[in-house]
Image (tube, grey):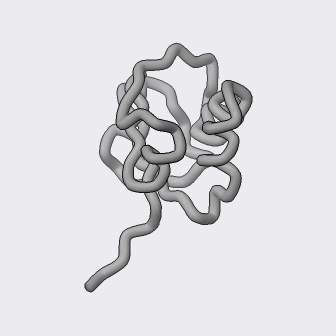
Amino acid sequence: MDILYFAWVRERIGLPKERVTTKAATVAELVTELRAREDRYAAAFADLSALRVAVDQELTDFDASLEGAREVAFFPPMTGG
């Protein structure tokens, strides 16, 4: 599965994209796995209320299923302007 990171999430993790193998059933479980990897992931995912997530380019919640998912993207909330 491809994981995409945008804006400050990308800056904290240091990667724009990576491919991971996971046993996570939901986005929340994937985040738990990522947090456990290294401090930079823990910092990026410290406050989930400051993040949005999309699974296969569809905005969703952290309790969303990953069954059949090919891509997960993490990004800060978008603002107008």
* Residue at position x 67%, y 25% in the image: 37
For residue 36, side relative to residue 5 (left or right): right
For residue 68, side relative to residue 40 (left or right): left
Location of residue 68 in the rendering, given as x and y in whole percent from the top left corner: 42, 24
Q: Which quadrant of the view contains residue 5? A: top left
Nearest the camera: 80 or 67?
80
Location of residue 36 in the rendering, given as x and y in whole percent from the top left corner: 73, 29
Location of residue 29 in the rendering, given as x and y in whole percent from the top left corner: 67, 34
Looking at this view, name the residue that lies furthest to the top: 21
Tally of marks: 0
Q: Which quadrant of the view contains residue 25? A: top right
Q: Is residue 28 above or below residue 36?
A: below
Q: Indicate the quadrant containing the C terminus: top left, top right, bottom left or bottom right.
A: bottom left
Looking at this view, name the residue that lies furthest to the bottom: 81
* Residue at position x 34%, y 49% in the image: 58
For residue 20, side relative to residue 16 (left or right): right
Nearest the camera: 64 or 29?
29
Looking at this view, name the residue that lies furthest to the left: 81
Location of residue 57 in the rendering, given as x and y in whole percent from the top left corner: 31, 45
Q: Indicate the quadrant containing the N terminus: top left, top right, bottom left or bottom right.
A: top left
* Residue at position x 34%, y 38% in the image: 56
Q: Is residue 48 above or below residue 38?
A: below
